[in-house]
Image (cartoon, rainbow, N blue to C red):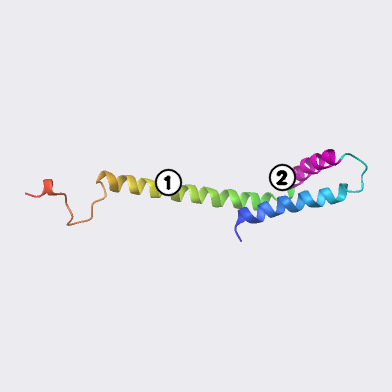
Amino acid sequence: MSAAVKYTLGRIGLFVAVLAALWFVDMNMFLRLMVALVFSAALSFFLLRGWRDEMAGEMAESAARRRADKERLRSALAGDDQPAGNEPEDRRS
């Protein structure tokens, strides 16, 4: 399971757990949802640090891979990346 899925499910789980804990508190439903959102965000900052760091690492690796692929494609389109023996016609004499 990817780190992004684990982190997202963890955030949703924390929100549901805090909301369940606040269910029997006498307050407006909108206020209860907002309090659950704030408290679950604060808890996830501490409790889900490992999954968040893992997700950030995966995202950084993916961005680096895309950047390298983009540079490889640009150099190939510019003609800098010619295989041996496949020289353009104007270079052969």
Q: Say left or right for 10 vs 60.
A: right
Earlier-in-chain disc, 1 versus 2? 2
Image quadrant of residue 25?
top right
- Residue 23: x, y in percent? 88, 48
Pick whichever, 37 or 71, lies toward us: 37
Q: Which residue is mark 1?
A: 67
Q: Determine which residue is flagged by label 2.
A: 45
- Identify the main secondary structure in magenta: helix
Element at label 2? helix
Say whether residue 31 is magenta: yes
Using the image, tell me which numbered label, if any, was put on residue 28. Answer: none
Q: Which residues are magenta?
A: 29-45
Q: Identify the image quadrant of the N terminus.
A: bottom right
Could you tell me which residue is drawn at 64 percent across and 49 percent down?
52
Q: Residue at x 66, y 52 (%)?
A: 7
Residue type, mark 1 in image: Arg
Label 1 secondary element: helix
* Left or right: where 51 falls relative to 24: left
Describe residue 26's horizontal placement relative to residue 16 as left or right.
right
Q: Is residue 20 left or right of residue 81?
A: right
